[in-house]
């Protein structure tokens, strides 16, 4: 009965590789997000989709490309990984247009060597 | 635009009280409080909408002063389980852009 799930939980890879992270929510929410949390714990919004439409696209390198095949799924593909991409990536979802409580997935810990 | 949280860190003994502040340079529509334990995801605590409401959840409560553009989180009679990093997230309007602007967090450690 997991609300927001992400795979994989851990990802260790070499510089220059391409990798994907998947996110799924079973809460029936319309909006999903990708966040990057660096070693200093700063939560940086990267992207947000509402009903498969991109509504937030922060200043993120073009190497990062989100894809939302349906409103329950939001994937993140990263090309040509760099050392600075090492971080924890959180997926989140929300529904209520007024209160906007965000429910976070467990995170994907990415380490680029 | 990023809200400023203070203090950056606080250490308490079990049973002590703490206040965490979140201040914005812009007028706010809502303030959201989350707690993140080490190695885990942020977890929602409460939301305060403009109107100066005060909310509570057991021994954790919060206030929102719209005029001062700030919110405060009150932790009373702290428990070991309160340890973690507390984040405030702010929204400046109720539009379709659902972006929360997050503070840098306040690290709270509660010791026995």
Image: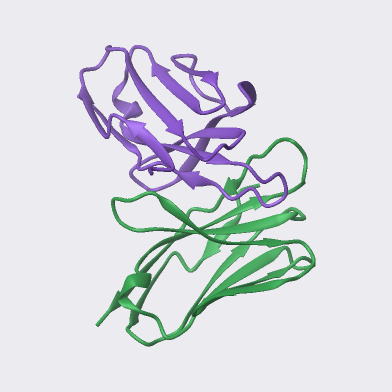
Residue B9 versus residue B48: which sits nearer the camera? B48
Quadrant housing the N terminus of chain A: top left
- Specify whether A38 is left or right of B51: left
Q: Which chain is green?
A: B
- Specify whether A71 is left or right of B40: right
The residue depicted at 58 percent of the width and 37 percent of the height is A29
Residue B61 versus residue A60: which sits nearer the camera? B61
- Specify whether B60 is left or right of B55: left
The residue depicted at 80 percent of the width and 66 percent of the height is B51
From this view, report whether residue B100 is shown above or below residue A34.
Answer: below
- Residue A8 picture location, percent across and down: 28, 29
From this view, report whether residue A89 is shown above or below residue A101.
Answer: above
- Residue B1 picture location, percent across and down: 66, 47
- For residue A17, what is the image quadrant? top left
The residue depicted at 28 percent of the width and 50 percent of the height is B39
The coloring applied to the image is: by chain
- For residue A4, what is the image quadrant? top left
Residue A32 versus residue B69: which sits nearer the camera? A32
- Residue A106 picture location, percent across and down: 35, 43
Q: Which chain is purple?
A: A
The residue depicted at 70 percent of the width and 36 percent of the height is B97
From this view, report whether residue B100 is shown above or below residue B49.
Answer: above
- Residue A79 picture location, percent across and down: 37, 12
Quadrant housing the C terminus of chain A: top left
């Amino acid at each position: 009965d997991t609300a927001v799930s992400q795979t994989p939980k851990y990802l260790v890879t070499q510089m220059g590789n391409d990798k994907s992270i998947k996110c799924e929510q079973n809460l029936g929410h319309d909006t999903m997000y990708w966040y990057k949390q660096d070693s200093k714990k700063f939560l940086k919004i990267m992207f947000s989709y509402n009903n498969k439409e991109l509504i937030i696209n922060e200043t993120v390198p073009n190497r990062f490309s989100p894809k939302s095949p349906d409103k329950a799924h939001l994937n993140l593909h990263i090309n040509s990984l760099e050392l600075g991409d090492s971080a924890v990536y959180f997926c989140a979802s929300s529904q209520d247009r007024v209160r906007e409580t965000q429910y976070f997935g467990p995170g994907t810990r990415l380490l680029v060597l | 635009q990023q809200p400023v949280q203070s203090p950056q860190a606080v250490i308490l003994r079990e049973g002590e009280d703490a206040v965490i502040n979140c201040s914005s340079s812009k007028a706010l529509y809502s303030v959201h409080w989350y707690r993140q334990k080490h190695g885990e995801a942020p977890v929602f605590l409460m939301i305060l909408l403009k109107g100066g409401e005060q909310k509570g959840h057991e021994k954790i409560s919060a206030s929102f002063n719209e005029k001062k553009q700030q919110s405060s989180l009150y932790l009373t009679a702290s428990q070991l389980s309160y340890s973690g990093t507390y984040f405030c997230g702010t929204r400046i309007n109720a539009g379709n852009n659902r972006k929360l602007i997050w503070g840098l967090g306040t690290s709270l450690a509660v010791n026995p």
